[in-house]
Amino acid sequence: MAPTTVLAKSVGAASVGTTWGDAALLGQLVAACHAELQLPYTVPGGMAEYRTALACSFVRKFWTLSCAALGSGDIEPQIVSEMEEDERTVSHGQQAYERVSDRAIVGHGVAHVSALQQTTGEARYIDDMPAVGAELHMALVPSAHPHAHVLKVDSAEALAMAGVKCVLTHEDVPGSNIWNIFHDEELLPSRTVHHVGQPVALVVAATQRQAQAAAQRVHITYEVLPAVLTVRDAVAQGALFAEERKLVRGDVDAALAASDVTLSGTSYCGAQEHFYLETMGAVAVPKGENGEMDLYASTQNPTEAQMVCAEALGVPAARIVCHVKRMGGGFGGKESRAVLVSTLAALGAQHTGQAVRLVLDRDVDMQMSGQRHPFYATWTVGATRTGELRALRMRLYSNGGFSHDLSMGVLERAVSHVDNCYRLGAADIVGRV
């Protein structure tokens, strides 16, 4: 509900002077919780309504269990039993594979190649890897504003702290500071930050705690700029990229005019956090000669991780080797954004000459990694009185944030899937990011 623990003070206030167990009080407590713990739909992580409803359900659960324990109120025993914690035994399962024939392939049961290691806990992920020599740890210094000029980065206090090896900014990138598919992002901002959580500087220290503590002592002076925060605001202000994706068929104006029924409206689909179990992480290990580097990364795109790292370090791509054995989930969230993490770790490793580990905490991951795109659409549809769709005109807008990243590919998929399983006689669908 917030970056730190919050108390729903109005819930406690609503119960003062009342009788616990009074059925009317429950409604007042839930209403107070719902009113106080409202989240905007742009909240990091998305699912604002669900998170508010979940908090209210905790109030209801506490009410039910406490009333049952105190013997107050008219609580149904079945509801109490459904809310009680169950002691679950260790789960187990068994799957039998029927052999079709000794020589057949089709019909044979095949176990997942990593199933045994994952179910026994033997599977190793990035942060399970043992330390590589005198390994160092990296922490990010995130932007506090969605849009601002960076006027000054003061790292003096951080550098004086125990265990701190260095603080890096864009000035410490030896190669190209530009990356991503459209080459419209900086690894570390040279002047302007474009979203809350964007890494402004990097702290490398002997331990993760030392690095994270020092990152909080890097002081940044900003000139705050106006920010566009929602896709609706972007459409209203014309803050869109120039590229369009179109799907056009037939004469939409004529088809709408000939339709028995026409409807117009708007639709909105909120953001969705990928929420892979393993957060983004990487270990960069310098090989000690000719700028060679081994990257161990949780990424869906090891080739891009290799290429961007090489460009940033100013070395040929052949000197960078990216290892990806497995990921603890990705779901598209690690196609490009994880490349930034592995490249920043490599930057620290190059400057210190030691292995550097950068594994993001969940809150940092959610702030800097982006989400599945929110979409906003305006539409007019025409149909016959029997329900046959005749025409659709739609303007589809995706919130791609400040850079292109993979947004054009996502938009192409959205535009081409708008019709779902229906055959539209006439369509005029235009998508923008």
Image (cartoon, helix red, strand yellow):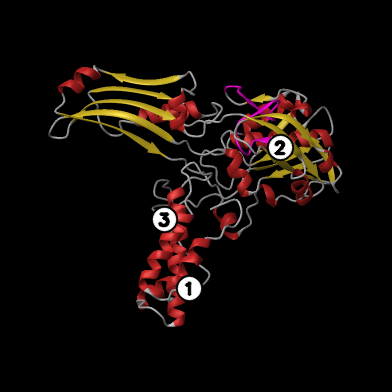
Residue 111: in magenta span:
no
Residue 219 falls left or right of residue 324: right
Residue type indicated by callout 1: Asp
> CA–CA distance between discs 3 and 1?
39 Å
Please name the residue shown 39% across and 49% down the image.
107
Span of residues in magenta: 182-199
Majority secondary structure of the magenta segment? loop
Q: Secondary structure at mark 2?
A: strand
Look at the picture and state if 165 lies above or below 169: below
**Nearer the viewer's eye, disc 3 or disc 1?**
1
Packing grade of label 2 (10 A; few <14, some 14-19, many >=20) is many
Residue type indicated by callout 2: Leu
Q: Which numbered marker is on residue 99?
A: 3
Where is residue 112 shown, x and y percent of the image?
A: 51, 50
Please name the residue shown 74% across and 45% down the image.
216
Packing grade of label 1 (10 A; few <14, some 14-19, many >=20) is few
Q: Which numbered marker is on residue 86?
A: 1
Mark closest to the chain's N terminus, 3 or 1: 1
Residue type indicated by callout 3: Arg
* Residue on which the image places disc 2: 295
Please name the residue shown 36% across and 70% down the image.
24
Name the image quarter holding residue 268. top left
Q: Secondary structure at mark 1?
A: loop
Which of the two residues, 426 or 349, is positioned nearer the viewer here? Answer: 426
Which of the two residues, 154 or 412, is positioned nearer the viewer here? Answer: 154
Residue 190: in magenta span:
yes
Where is residue 288 shown, x and y percent of the image?
A: 84, 34
